[in-house]
Image: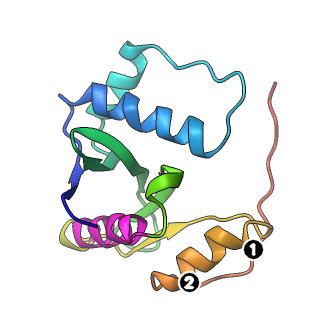
Amino acid sequence: MDNIEIKKLSSSELSQFIELIRVFEDVFEMKNFQMPSSYYLQTLLDRDDFFVFVSISQNQVIGGLTAYTLSQYYSEKPLVYIFDLAVLTKYQRQGIGKSLIEAINVYCKKMGAEEVFVQADLVDDYALDFYRATGGLPEEVIHFTYPLS
């Protein structure tokens, strides 16, 4: 895909972070989504253990990912968890998601992380195929949640 820029957002790029959240809202079909306050989102963007990569085409955020750094006690090298990754539907299957994975892997290798990991639902064949195609090694786990509300 021509003229696609992939970049890690700095703490001064809140508007592009909000644009990415709108991409997630669209792609994940989030009904009745309420955007958190700009103040809250800014505090997230200011953190050292949270980062955002975006894909930009013609000054518009068309995709991206969010990730958290997790300190561990088995090693001094952190783990990085990709929380969300999405590309607007009309831009999918053009290598943008793969470029995002490559960008975060390069960044995390430079920062000394041990590994990057991501979860995908077993029923989401598209996500499973995508992560396999980008070099991800699947592990069979079951994810449990404890709803607190």
Q: What amino acid is found at the position of numbered circle 1 in the picture? A: Val
Could you tell me which secondary element the residue under label 2 belongs to? helix
Mark positioned earlier in the residue sequence (1 or 2): 2
User: What is the x, y in percent for residue 15?
Assistant: 29, 25
Query: Which residue sits at x=48%, y=69%?
Result: 93
Q: Amino acid at mark 2?
A: Arg
Dot label at residue 3 = none
Q: Tell me the chief SS of the magenta region.
A: helix
User: Foreground: 63 or 111?
Assistant: 63
Q: Is residue 84 visible?
A: no
Between label 1 and label 2, give the one nearer the viewer: 2
Vertically, is 114 above or below 48?
A: below
- The local crowd at label 1, few if under 14, some if 14 to 19, many if 20 or more residues have their Cα within 10 Å, is few
Give the x, y percent position of residue 21.
Answer: 47, 34
Q: Which residues are magenta?
A: 94-108
| Residue at the image position 46 percent from the left and 73 percent from the top | 74
Q: Indicate whether residue 100 is drawn in magenta.
A: yes
Q: Which residue is mark 2?
A: 132
